[in-house]
Image (cartoon, rainbow, N blue to C red):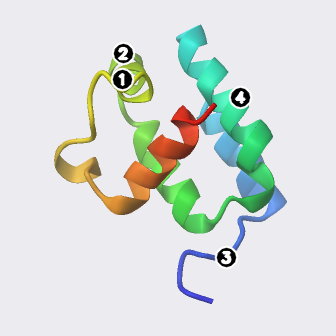
């Protein structure tokens, strides 16, 4: 397997879910839907990218999720863009 493509374990998934709790309900709704759809197939690469997105302020994250903005600077990478698309998908 390619590095970063291994599935995350239960403990890491639990920690990631805790880390993803947000102050804005709108962000939480995107994140809940993301986990409902993708948690069984999340890789360590996805988890790392999602952790980086969680470093953003709530309003900046919401702008990305609503496609008002696209990733810039350090987070403008393929892994982060992939997770954003997963978060945006309905």
CA gap, disc 1 and disc 3: 29 Å
Q: Residue 41 location, x and y as percent?
A: 74, 60
Image mark for residue 24: none
Look at the numbered disc 3 and give the secondary structure of its residue.
loop
Image mark for residue 6: 3
Left or right of 74? Residue 55 is: right
Residue that extends furthest to the bottom in the rendered view of this protein: 1
* Quarter occupied by the N terminus: bottom right
Earlier along the polypeptide chain: callout 4 or callout 3? 3
CA gap, disc 4 and disc 1: 18 Å
Depth check: 79 or 12 in front?
79
Q: Quadrant of residue 2?
A: bottom right
Earlier along the polypeptide chain: callout 1 or callout 3? 3
Residue 18 sits above or below residue 49 on the image? above
* Quarter occupied by the C terminus: top right
Residues at marks 2 and 1 touching, judged by CB atoms closer than 8 Å: yes
| Residue beneath disc 4 | 32
Q: Residues within 10 Å of mark 2 (few under 14, many from 20)?
A: few
Image mark for residue 57: 1
Residue 71 sits above or below residue 68 on the image? below
Residue that extends furthest to the left in the rendered view of this protein: 73
Q: Quadrant of residue 8?
A: bottom right
Q: Residue at x 70, y 46 (%)?
A: 15
CA gap, disc 2 and disc 1: 6 Å
Look at the numbered disc 2 and give the secondary structure of its residue.
helix
């Amino acid at each position: 397997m390619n590095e970063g493509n291994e599935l995350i374990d239960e403990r890491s998934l639990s920690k990631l879910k805790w880390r993803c709790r947000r102050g804005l309900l709108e962000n939480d709704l995107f994140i809940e839907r993301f986990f409902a759809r993708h948690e069984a197939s999340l890789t360590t690469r996805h988890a790392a990218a999602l952790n980086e997105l969680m470093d953003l302020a709530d309003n900046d994250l919401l702008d990305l999720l609503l496609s008002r903005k696209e990733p810039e600077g350090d987070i403008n990478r393929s892994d982060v863009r992939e997770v954003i698309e997963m978060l945006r998908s309905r």
